[in-house]
Amino acid sequence: MGAGTYVGRVGGLAVALGIGTAVFTGHGVASAEPSDTSASTSGTSQSSSSESKADTKKADAKKPDTTVSGAAKEDDTEKEDDTKDTKATKDDDDKADEEPKDESDEPDEPANKPKKQATVAVSQPDEAVDKPAADDGEDEPAPVETAAWTLAAASRREIGASQDESPAAANSVSATPVAATTVVAKPSTPLLTPLQHVPIFGPLFVTPVVAALKQVPFVGDILHPIIGYPVGFTGGTTPRDVHVISADGTAIYVHFFPAQGANTGKVAPTILNGPGLGLPGETNPLAQDNPFMPNQVIGMAPLLQGGYNVVTWDPRGEWQSGGVLQIDNPAYEGQDMKAILDWIAQQPEVQLDAPGDPRIGMVGASYGGGIQLVTAAIDHRVDAIAPTIAWNNLNTSLYNAGAVKTSWGAILTAALLLTGARVNPQIYGAVATGLFTGQITPAQQDFLDQRSPDRLLDQITAPTLLLQGTVDTLFSLQEAHDNAIALIGNGVPTKVVWFCGGHGACISSGNDGTLIEEATMNWLDRYVMGLAVSTGPQFEWVDQKGRRFGSSQYPVTPGPALAVQTTISETLGLYQFFNGSGPNLRALQAGPIGALLGILSSSRAANAVNVTLPAQQTTQYLVGAPQLEFTYSGTGEARHVYAQLVDDETGLVLGNQVTPIPVTLDGEEHVATVSLEQIAHTLEPGQTVTLQIVASAIQYQAFITYGRLTVSNVKLSVPTTNATAVAPASELDALLTA
């Protein structure tokens, strides 16, 4: 198994993304490990370890400037002036005079927030890699021998992990470290890195090729174990790679990027930046945007230039990491994150709140968003998180009202298969059951529940910025809403941002990423860097035309609902695929990634029961979940019909969203009552919106659907917000200082 097999995985990812053709596929991943078998980290001597949280929380105290040496700085980087201090320290709970005067835009930090407990990490000899973790009841294969870490023709062996897991193990995670933790990290050297240092040949031929490949989205990250970082073209500091050994012996491939800008060569807070499902950790420190979801997730460069260290990684079971993917399970991926945090605490560039307790924030989308909620719940060393397009519960998002999102299940499974991910087989089993039966078993529902952050939210104390896409058809706005309500109810400082994007296509307007970057940086600067900056209104959203609005509270203050009721009886023919909702071919205009994610967007259906809201005389801001009730009777074979709202001006479905509605086709009369998916839409005077009840939807495909459904007594109520609670972009400055 060689580099060709690794390139095959690149082709596999291209197929999964719809932007290329797979030439080869396989499970091998090329790597070049040093022959030196001694385990090491970048350093265990902490120049900042004496800076306790109590010392750093005084707003008027300046942290001493501390420089680092060795691999932490690039060869041609000049030492910063030791007397120049550009870092602000973290705010104390009693430092009210340094905060914005009016805190109505976000809740105070809970007074009973558990005190962090430090976990000290130390490096150990290489034998630790070969020793399995303490028996936790799992049937784990023996870890690989040390020789597997050496250079072996650009190939590697995977460290084994269990194919199964017990619910008891998943539920036994503690939110507080109970003892000092030992962590092992092995340096990793990409294949071409030594060649870049060959005089003349390296700088003239190898480094330019590496630098060029590094700027190609996906390609640079996927090929990183072979090409490495371009020497002299990483922004002024030198990144490094290691395999961090998790509690069960699984090796997690981790990348560390020292802070740039004013914090070059100094200790700094650290941001963990998690990748989406099927993607490797980011490795381009010059990237202004996320390579997979540009303008939807903050890029690595703004974080580094903002004075933060950045850490990325390949999740368990994917790419260069070992083990078996368990979908952000706290007993597996959660423990990986604890090990990474332990290792981060050993790095000389890292600012510490206490020994073993690094100053930490987290960012990332989708799979990289879910792991933030899990990590913040089980490890209170995390100081702030900004999960983007994450989920609350996998059952409500993938099995909403008993309807399987079969199309999304197929896409996600293809991505995992074609990238060679090593996945818990129960995941594929649930997908197959849903595809072929339209249902999943109770055991499979329990399996998804174990991987859902909703059961952990009461353990989160870190300030949380929730960013969710208005056109996300996988994890809808409702997922972020449920997370927000729980966190706000627990007194956690929380802000909610709805933007045009997510697992979908922004086809009604544009998205330049400004809102995402501003909100993320302000949140991190306040709660991680400790700067006295405002994070703005508690709730911001973007409507269908890209206009930005805000409210000082979440949820928004409700206004009078728009309502319509009809007693007319209509019959809907029940059949699948034809004349239903979606696919929306206008998503093809959104570029390769937008087309892939947006093709599952809903569209106006030809076969539908239609009810139109009356035109309004004044501008109405539709924000929230509409309520629908109707009477029906029918015969045939179908478990669901679907409801959506259509903008009659553009013909687009609001938020590209469709809601499944369970039905019973026994010929008897029934009443269906359902909350539709959340929306963010501005209705101008004279404009109308039409409710459609349809027989089929592209996101939910059932193999057997036939019959007839008679619908009557339709009642629709659409929520609005008071105009006084809304501020367009031109008035946001007032809210920012409120």
Image (cartoon, rainbow, N blue to C red):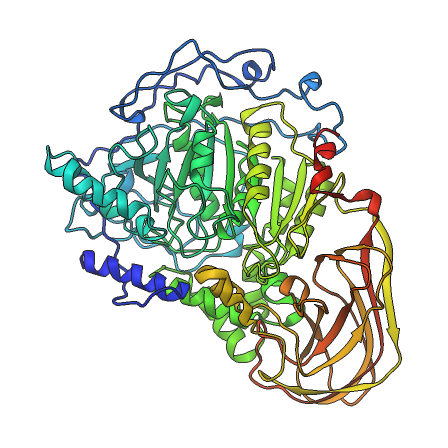
The one of 470 and 153 positioned closer to us in this rendering: 470
Indicate the quadrant where residue 690 lies: bottom right
- Judged left or right of residue 44, residue 457 is right
- Furthest residue toward top: 83
| Residue 541 placement (x, y as % from top left) | 68, 48
- Judged left or right of residue 720, residue 271 is left
- Judged left or right of residue 346, residue 565 is right
| Residue 36 placement (x, y as % from top left) | 17, 35
Above or below for 187 versus 476: above
- Furthest residue toward front: 686
| Residue 258 placement (x, y as % from top left) | 37, 29
Indicate the quadrant where residue 704 lies: bottom right
Question: From this viewpoint, is residue 477 visible?
Answer: yes
The one of 247 and 647 positioned closer to us in this rendering: 647
| Residue 517 placement (x, y as % from top left) | 54, 40
At 51% from the left edge and 41% from the top edge, which residue is drawn?
363
Picture quarter with the C terminus: top right
Count the marks.
0
Picture quarter with the N terminus: bottom left
